[in-house]
Image (tube, grey):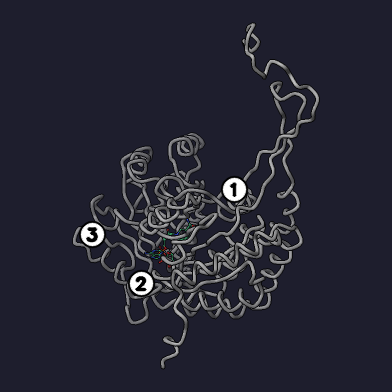
């Protein structure tokens, strides 16, 4: 019998058993103690430190990610999240004293963060290690049991997570379930206390629908078309390099906060394109498709999806840089398209790859109408030195997050919440926001037996309770 057939199928029954085992552990109170939380966070730290080599191997197998990017974008981010959580955990767990009102006098009150219970993290393929472990840090710090379902689209990373989380973590409260739609569906049928999902909005709707049946709260970390508005009053070389850093050097555009499209003025576009071409060559050489400093496309389905965007007849003749692709090695060069029509495919879905359309407007202020006519993005970017434009941008554009004069870097600031709004998601995490995402803020009011006002009690005669 083939090995696959011997492996027990993970179905609804297995999912039900898993959740009840974890709930049993949670109900003992084990995961609530400060010591347990710290020990599990330290185990994560140890796992990452002791298996950097395997993490790199997995990510190179799945995405051919350059090692430097892995160190910054996955390992470095996780180390920093763990350090913050371990340093701050005691403060985060402390009840917050709050004022009370005359109605309850004498009394005192506090807000006590308590763990939600048994939680589910479903993660995506593009940063498969980071997007799996980072939400788990929040779940564990907040004192929950947690099941991770990594993305089957990044199989080497999924196996890594199953193997090593299984070895390092307390299996009575922390588990990994590998698999695709059937396994995720079986998990989603169960009653969870929180579901934290990262991925596209179509599946986000499935997750939210399944959660609604049990009134389970969800965090949906989704995507969207992140605009980059480029004014002419900028340091062109710095802006260009940051756009390249946030687009191609960041997983070859396969990132939720990647630059999806640029808007600039008709007058400035030729200068910007020349600068982008020049810097792309500086970063990736004359034949970027062969560069080892750029990730490949995750699989042939995504390669075909991106090819379809380029083959759309509405964008024919619009490529001004790149365009080379090679399906045999799943590589697509950094590609820039100028003045694509608004109704082209590329302007109507999240690109999530190395293609970058540039739209042009007469005045830079006109770019706001283009952005606000679309669904709210996960991030919106503006390059300018004009303070008035910065203010208008921040006040006018609704997005999960905004960055002025850079791309994506807000996600590295732990004091900022990271999450979407509208179509780009609901809920946020990073730093204390991760702890909050997996905690219930419980209201606690302390009263003594003094100060019992008779006006509270019937009979309500003689205008006793007139305010
Ligand atoms: P994906 O294909 O890995 O899917 C995400 C998860 O959904 C996987 O674990 C998968 O098994 C599960 N899934 C797939 N089909 C399902 C179904 N029918 N029922 C239940 N579960 C199912 O990832 P993806 O969706 O291609 O990821 C890319 C998207 O994620 C983009 O839109 C991107 O912007 C977004 N994203 C957002 C963030 C963020 O932090 N906001 C981060 C990364 C990616």
Q: Position of residue 149 (x, y in %)?
A: 50, 68
Q: In the displayed orientation, state which residue is furthest to the top.
A: 462
Residue 26: name its quadrant: bottom right
Q: Between disc 1 and disc 3, whose residue precedes?
A: 3
Residue 335: name its quadrant: bottom left
Which one is in front in this view, the residue at disc 2 or the one at disc 1?
Answer: 1
Which of the image's four quarters has the N terminus? bottom left
Residue 36: name its quadrant: bottom right
| Ligand 1 rendered quadrant | bottom left
Residue closer to the observer: 61 or 42: 42
**Label 2 Cα neighbours within 10 Å, binned few <14 / some 14-19 / many ≥20:** many
Rendered image: mark on residue 332:
2
**Label 1 Cα neighbours within 10 Å, binned few <14 / some 14-19 / many ≥20:** some
**Label 3 Cα neighbours within 10 Å, binned few <14 / some 14-19 / many ≥20:** many
Q: Helix, strand, or loop for circle 3? A: helix
The answer to whether 179 appears left or right of 308 in the picture is right
Q: Helix, strand, or loop for circle 2? A: strand
Report if the CB atoms under discs 2 and 1 are less than 8 Å apart: no
Q: Which residue position holds label 1?
A: 416
Going 67% across and 19% down the picture, which residue do you hit?
456
Q: CA distance from mark 1 to mark 3?
A: 38 Å
Residue closer to the observer: 77 or 5: 5
Going 60% across and 70% down the picture, which residue do you hit?
71
From the viewer's perspective, is residue 389 above or below residue 356? above
Q: In the displayed orientation, state which residue is furthest to the left.
A: 313
Q: Helix, strand, or loop for circle 1? A: loop
Q: Between disc 3 and disc 2, whose residue precedes?
A: 3
The answer to whether 391 appears left or right of 307 in the picture is right
Residue 243 seen from this side = yes
Q: Position of residue 359 (x, y in %)?
A: 31, 50
């Amino acid at each position: 019998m083939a090995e696959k057939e011997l492996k027990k199928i993970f179905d609804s029954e297995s999912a039900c058993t898993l959740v009840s085992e974890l709930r049993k552990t949670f109900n003992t109170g084990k995961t609530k103690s400060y010591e347990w939380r710290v020990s599990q966070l330290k185990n994560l730290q140890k796992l990452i430190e002791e298996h950097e080599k395997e993490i790199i191997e997995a990510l190179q197998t799945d995405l051919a990610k350059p090692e430097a990017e892995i160190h910054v974008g996955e390992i470095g981010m996780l180390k920093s999240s763990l350090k913050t959580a371990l340093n701050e955990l005691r403060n985060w767990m402390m009840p917050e004293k709050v004022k009370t009102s005359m109605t309850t006098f004498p009394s005192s009150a506090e807000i006590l963060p308590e763990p939600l219970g048994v939680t589910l993290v479903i993660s995506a393929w593009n940063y498969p290690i980071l997007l799996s472990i980072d939400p788990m840090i929040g779940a564990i710090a907040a004192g929950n049991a947690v099941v991770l379902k990594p993305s089957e689209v990044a199989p080497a990373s999924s196996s890594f997570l199953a193997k090593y989380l299984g070895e390092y973590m307390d299996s009575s409260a922390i588990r990994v379930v590998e698999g695709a739609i059937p396994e995720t569906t079986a998990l989603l049928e169960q009653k969870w206390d929180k579901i934290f999902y990262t991925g596209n909005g179509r599946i986000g709707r499935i997750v939210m629908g399944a959660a609604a049946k049990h009134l389970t709260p969800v965090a949906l970390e989704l995507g969207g078309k992140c605009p980059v508005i480029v004014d002419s009053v900028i340091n062109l070389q710095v802006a260009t390099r940051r756009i390249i850093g946030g687009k191609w050097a960041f997983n070859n555009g396969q990132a939720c906060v990647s630059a999806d499209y640029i808007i600039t003025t008709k007058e400035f576009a030729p200068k910007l394109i020349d600068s982008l071409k020049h810097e792309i060559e500086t970063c990736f050489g004359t034949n970027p498709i062969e560069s080892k400093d750029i990730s490949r496309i995750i699989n042939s389905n995504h390669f075909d999806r991106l090819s379809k965007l380029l083959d759309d007849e509405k964008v024919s003749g619009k490529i001004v840089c790149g365009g080379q692709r090679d399906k045999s090695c799943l590589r697509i060069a950094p590609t820039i398209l100028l003045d694509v029509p608004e109704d082209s495919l590329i302007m109507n879905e999240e690109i999530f790859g190395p293609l970058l359309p540039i739209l042009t407007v007469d005045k830079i202020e006109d770019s706001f109408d283009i952005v606000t006519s679309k669904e709210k993005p996960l991030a919106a970017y503006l390059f300018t030195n004009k303070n008035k434009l910065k203010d208008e941008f921040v006040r006018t554009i609704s997005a999960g997050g905004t960055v002025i004069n850079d791309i994506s870097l807000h996600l590295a600031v732990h004091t900022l919440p990271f999450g979407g709004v509208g179509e780009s998601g609901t809920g946020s995490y990073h730093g204390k926001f991760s702890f909050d995402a997996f905690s219930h803020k419980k209201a606690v009011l302390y009263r003594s037996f003094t100060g019992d006002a008779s006006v509270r009690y019937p009979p309500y005669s003689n205008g006793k309770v007139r305010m």
